[in-house]
Amino acid sequence: MATTSQAESTGAPGSGGRGLVSYLASRWVVIFLVLETVFFCLKAPGFADLNSAQILLFYGTQVFLLAVGELFVIVTGGIDLSVGYILGFASIISIKLIVWLMGLGLSPLLAIVAGLLLTLVIGLVPGLINGALVAYLKVPPFIATFSMLGVCHGVSELIINGVYAMGLPQLAANIGSGRLLYIVPGGPTVFFNRPNVARGTKIYDIVPNIVIVAVIVIGIFAFVLARTRFGRHVYAIGGNMDAAVRSGIPVKRRLLQVYALSSFLASLAGIAYAFMYVSGKADAGASILLDSIAAVMIGGASMFGGSGTVIRTMVGALIIAVLEQGLRMSGTPTFNIYILVGAILILAVIMERYMPQHR
Amino acid sequence: MVSDTAASRGPAAEPGSGGSGRSSGGGAAGLLVRNWAGFFLLFMVLLFSFTGRNFLSVVNFQNVLYLQTVPFLLAAAETFVIITGGLDLSIGFVMGLASVSAAALMHVFLGMGLPAPWSIFFGSIAAILVSMIPGLINGIVITRFKVPPFIATMGMWGIANGVALKICGGFPIAGLPDRLSKLGNGYLLYVLPGSFVSFLDKPQWFPDARIRELWRLVPFGVIFVLVALAVLSFVLRRGRFGRHTYAIGGSMDAALRSGIAVDRHLVRIYVLSAFLAGLAGVFNVFQTGVGNYTTFSAMYELFAVAAVVIGGASLFGGKGTLWRSALGVLVLAFLENGLDISGVPPFYRYIAVGVLLVVAVTIDKLFPDLN
């Protein structure tokens, strides 16, 4: 009795001191992001700038969206290798559909809206097949989604026959590269349309449209994962599959939905790609598969499932985005980015093992 | 446990899975299912013999084999890793790293005034040594720091790619001695029917313009692959190294308890995998005459995994043989070649690979007691 109370009293201050250290250590990812940002603000001229920050988010959109889809899959203990080529597939499909609809005589706006919705529906198909293979046929996720990668690649190339998909109306390009607000100092504030001003006049362009869409969508899915029954089920499946089955969670249906969700987000990223670059190609997302998985892992999710949050994944994605833009703006060859992302990915997983856990 | 169960843990961990099809052992059906990849290959060869002009010819078959030198070596590398229950995603880019290193080092040695044959020799050896470094790092990260193989080798995927691009500056490294590609593209036998038989090289007097009249038989690349596969297969089937490899994949716990130095063995496996990727990269320099970096869309590692899985290995470890993986490579190779010769757009190949993979895994799931 006495000894235990003594142990408690001596233990308390010590653990209090360790508390701060472990608090900081458990948030090393955030600290890393801050340090990295400060570093590039000092080193890369023009990095610490409103426009630079917006460009960073603008070009990061694809990785952000893919990473959220990948997070859901990884939380269930799976992996989705197909997202990069689903992105390419969607970028092609969306353009082909919009061009086709305009050929039917629809106005550009209507064609864009209809084409977009159709693409999102078609974009569910690869994910549903992935999910069916994984959940019902028990194909390992690695193999199922790699197969889908091949199929999406093949189908995309067949559709475009080896050339870029093109021919989007000007309106789509305006949406893709447009901003929400245009502020002319001492002049008008305009929504969506860049005002016609004399050459050389300073205009503040605030928030790319694409980024707004991405933030809203990511916010919704953050809520879904953290606060809904669906999200709880996703964690439960990844945490302990047996327990999830026994506690009556419809595991198969949830897995199907998770892969469909990942595919949906990849399609959205593909549409964003089409609008940003006004072209679609099969391998549009081939090189960012690593980035999207790395973002999830740097954000502290476990490969074995059951952990990870959208916010931490976004921190992981931002680390990569800041690195990329910072290196580019400080004039370092782009090859270094691959080395650094690979190294950070491995380090992050090692850190996660040795650092105190969240909560 | 280290194994990539992450990727495969999901639904397979569900109770009651894989219990079906226990009785698949004997009979004609069992034989058919057990060797489905072989039968499928046979079926393809028959089909394409009708649909493709000149498909069924020595020249074409030789070409298929010769062009698959690199995939054969990469599949062999992946076989060892997958048998232990791991995964190596870095081999494609390690291969690119070896390729550009070999070319760059050959240039260095040539610049130092070394004669061409020695430059080629030392450059190749040095590049293979360089390519083993990523494997060593992979092995250490996986065993000492318990990073899942998928993540560790994916990180190395990026690192090797970056280093390779740094070395070559984003362009293939050309300007190597001619005899390099002569070696890589040589044949054992040169025969002009009814006239002469010549070994290793065509006779000097025979004009290059008439080279198509010659029968060129047995490319060096094929001999190289056969020897490599035979040696590796021997290592895997006889001897302690192979036994330990299967033991670790079969049950990590049992392997530990029976006193196998699991960590050290796994490091060796990943070094071996990188070594074979390096060998493939150096051979690639001999074949093409330039040092090539690997592009993102090449996906060598994924096709290697596909070949191994079609060959009947399981991603859960403990299963697979080199010759079956080689069969997997052949299935993919003839699929590509046959579709191409039959005039089918090449894009169908990607779709077909995807479908085949799912078939392979489904068969493995339905008949778990094969092999």
Image (cartoon, coloured by chain):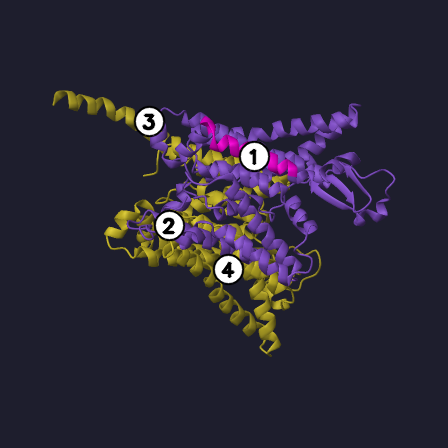
Chain colours: A yellow, B purple
Q: Amino acid at mark 2?
A: Gly
Q: Are marks 1 and 3 in contact (CB under 8 Å)?
A: no
- The numbered dot on residue B257 is 3
- Give the farthest residue toward the front: B194
Q: In the image, are marks 4 and 3 on the same chain?
A: no
Subunit that carries the residue with mark 1? B
The earlier-in-sequence mark between 1 and 3 is 1
| CA–CA distance in space, label 1 to label 2 | 29 Å
Residue assigned mark 4: A267
On the question of residue A254 being in view, the answer is: yes
Residue assigned mark 1: B230
Subunit that carries the residue with mark 3? B
Please indicate whether residue B324 sits to the left or right of residue A139 in the image. right
Which residue: 54% across, 74% down? A110
- Give the farthest residue toward the left: A1
Q: Residues within 10 Å of mark 1 (few under 14, many from 20)?
A: some
**Percent x, y of residue A319:** 51, 41
The earlier-in-sequence mark between 1 and 2 is 2
Element carrying mark 2: loop
| CA–CA distance in space, label 3 to label 2 | 34 Å
**Percent x, y of residue A107:** 58, 76
Please indicate whether residue A121 sits to the left or right of residue A99 in the image. left
